[in-house]
Each structure stands twice: as C-alpha cells, then as structure tokens.
C-alpha cells in the first residue's frame, strides 16, 4: 500500500459510527498483522467537497458531519459551528475540474 496511511479512530472506535462497515479492518485484510487493524490510506483533499460519500466505507454523505466526526475520532476535539464552516470553506477552495476517469464508479468486491 503506497501513500500515507492512518488509523481510523485514534480516540474512539470508528466502527461505532452509523453506516460504518465493522467487517472492514483496513490494511489488516491484506497483511494479517494485528498492528494494521483499522489502518486505511488517506485520500487527497482535492475536490473533497465534490466527491462524497466520505470515509473509506462511504459512511458519511455530508461534509460538515464528516469534519465533525474526524475532529472527534482523530483529534478528540469538538468543533464549534464556526470552525466547521471555516474548514468547509477551506476544503471547497480545493475544488477543481474532476477528471473524467475519476467520475467512474469503481468495481466493488
């Protein structure tokens, strides 16, 4: 697995989220190493406002909800409404033309 990887749920169990897939154990599925449980590739933030659903399993469809969830799970922080709005505005500034091949739905296992 190339690129940056991160544990999903540093401060809380990711799999307790509504819509999460508790069967997906991340990189562990490939390596069978316990240390790789819930380790997932971190995607680019380019076009993130246009490329929902969010998270490795598509558990979130709303960007502000995804931001609040990540702040809680990964940073142990509760963001104010204004902080969430500021982050949404920043993420929207990363929007550009989406390449045609990125718009194709990938085959799922």
Image (cartoon, rainbow, N blue to C red):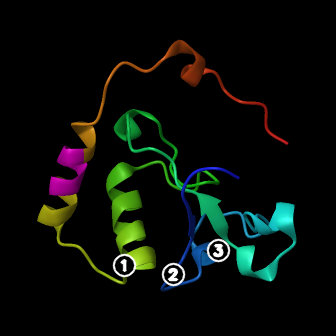
| Residue 101 is inside the magenta segment | no
Residue positioned 15% across, 55% down in the render? 86
Sequence-first tag of 1 and 3: 3
- State the residue in front, 3 or 13: 3
Residue positioned 73% across, 73% down in the render? 36
Q: In the shown orientation, is residue 38 left or right of residue 81? A: right
**Rendered location of residue 62, percent (x, y):** 40, 50
Asked if marks 2 and 1 touch (Cβ < 8 Å), the reply is yes
In three-dimensional space, the C-alpha distance between marks 1 and 3, rounded to whole angstroms, equals: 17 Å
Which of label 3 and label 2 is nearer to you? 2
Q: Which residue is mark 2?
A: 10
- State the residue in front, 9 or 6: 6
Q: In the shown orientation, is residue 28 left or right of residue 77? A: right
Q: In the shown orientation, is residue 58 left or right of residue 44? A: right
Sequence-first tag of 3 and 2: 2
Q: Is residue 8 above or below residue 67?
A: below
Q: Secondary structure at mark 2?
A: loop
**Rendered location of residue 21, percent (x, y):** 71, 63
Q: Which residue is mark 1?
A: 75
Q: Secondary structure at mark 1?
A: helix
Q: Which mark is residue 15?
A: 3
Which of label 1 and label 3 is nearer to you? 1
In three-dimensional space, the C-alpha distance between marks 3 and 2, rounded to whole angstroms, equals: 12 Å
């Amino acid at each position: 697995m190339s690129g940056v990887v991160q544990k999903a749920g540093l401060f809380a169990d990711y799999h307790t989220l509504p819509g999460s897939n508790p069967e997906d154990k991340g990189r562990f599925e490939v390596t069978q190493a316990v240390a790789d449980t819930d380790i997932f590739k971190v995607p680019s933030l380019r076009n993130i406002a246009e490329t929902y659903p969010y998270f490795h399993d598509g558990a979130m469809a709303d960007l502000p909800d995804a931001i609040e969830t990540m702040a809680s799970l990964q940073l142990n922080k509760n963001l104010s409404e204004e902080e969430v709005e500021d982050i949404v505005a920043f993420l929207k500034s990363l929007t550009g033309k989406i390449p045609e091949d990125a718009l194709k739905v990938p085959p799922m296992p």
